Image (cartoon, rainbow, N blue to C red):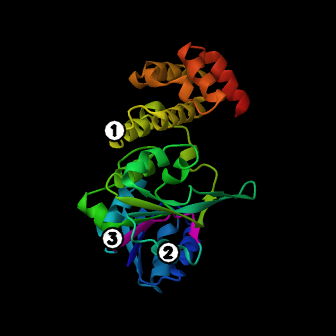
Amino acid sequence: MISIIIPVYNKSNYIKDTLMSVLSQSITDIEVIVIDDGSTDNSLNIVEKIRENDHRIKLYVNPHKGVSFARNTGLKNASGEYITFIDADDTVAPDYLEQLLKYSKNDLVVSGLIEDNKSTNQKKIINAARREISFGQFGRFIFNHDNFPIFSMAVTKLYSSKIIKDNQLKFRKSRFGEDTLFVMDYIVHCKNIRVIGYAGYINQILDQTLSRKYLENIWDIVVTIPNEANRLFNLKFNKGWQYLYVRSIKLSLLNNRNRPDVFKNGCKKIAQDPSFSYLKLVKAKNISDSILVCLIKFKLYSLLLRLYKSMY
């Protein structure tokens, strides 16, 4: 059996389509664990009505404590041999679970994702290179521009319930990147990973989602990802670590670009970070990354701010 964990917070416009896509799967041996995270709209009523006609839905109601707490409630109550996560404003193709289950002999199955941007009416497929990866190859394969985007999210994957429970894995409480940290925490306990070319998870890109909101003290949050990857996978400040670290810098600058004082103070904090000195220009993916590092290193924060304002 597969346990599908769906956290819900004020998704009344989307949760019906999400649940219908899950309940219509070609694989029927499933339990659908819905955790209402203290919704103040009609989300809970919609779920309860659908549950009346399909008892595969297990509903839990929490006070509003965030997506990590909600998903952890799902993990605590999951009884399936396998676990997957779906967001309450996304949908999946009818054969989504069937395709993942074909490769369930692997400790982690990773599929692709279709980004459906409602504001531009454009769709984009995100995936990693198709292959089976053994333990010693994880760091080199995952931490780069081509493959990391799909590994940074908790969705699109089939997890082993045994690995999660044996190692007492759970989502960390964080304002950003909790998906990435969970996936990394899980992967260090895997012997192999299978990446498949199939893309049946449809991610709706909506305005004002959490990832697009301004976050205070964002550097302290996003730098956790390269730091943890360095620790968990023994990257030793290599090229993969540098990719993650520069990515965190970009996220921080993008978040702060409309607040000049915060932007400059954020740059100072980055420059003072002990790990900043490990950045090597020869390892930079492109010239723009090298320029970014140089502008921070030589404290040209005003110029960097002008560049970011012109680009975004």
Identified at 63% across, 22% down, the residue is 291
Q: Residues within 10 Å of mark 3 (few under 14, many from 20)?
A: many
Which kind of residue does numbered mark 3 sit on?
Answer: Ala
Which kind of residue does numbered mark 1 sit on?
Answer: Arg
The residue that mark 2 highlights is 97
Tell me the element at label 3. Answer: loop
| Rendered view: 233 above or below 258 | below
| Rendered view: 267 above or below 101 | above
**Residue 235: x %, y % from top left:** 39, 37
| Rendered view: 305 above or below 9 | above
Numbered badge on residue 231? 1
Number of labelled discs? Answer: 3
Near-viewer residue (122 or 72)? 122
In the image: residue 273, left or right of residue 231: right
In the image: residue 204, left or right of residue 157: right
Query: Is there CB contact under 8 Å for labels 1 and 3?
Result: no
Work out how far the residue at label 1 is from the one at label 3, CA to CA, in angstroms.
29 Å
Q: Nearer the viewer, mark 1 or mark 3?
A: 1
Point out the stretch of residues depicted in magenta. 81-92
Mark positioned earlier in the residue sequence (3 or 2): 3
Tell me the element at label 2. Answer: helix
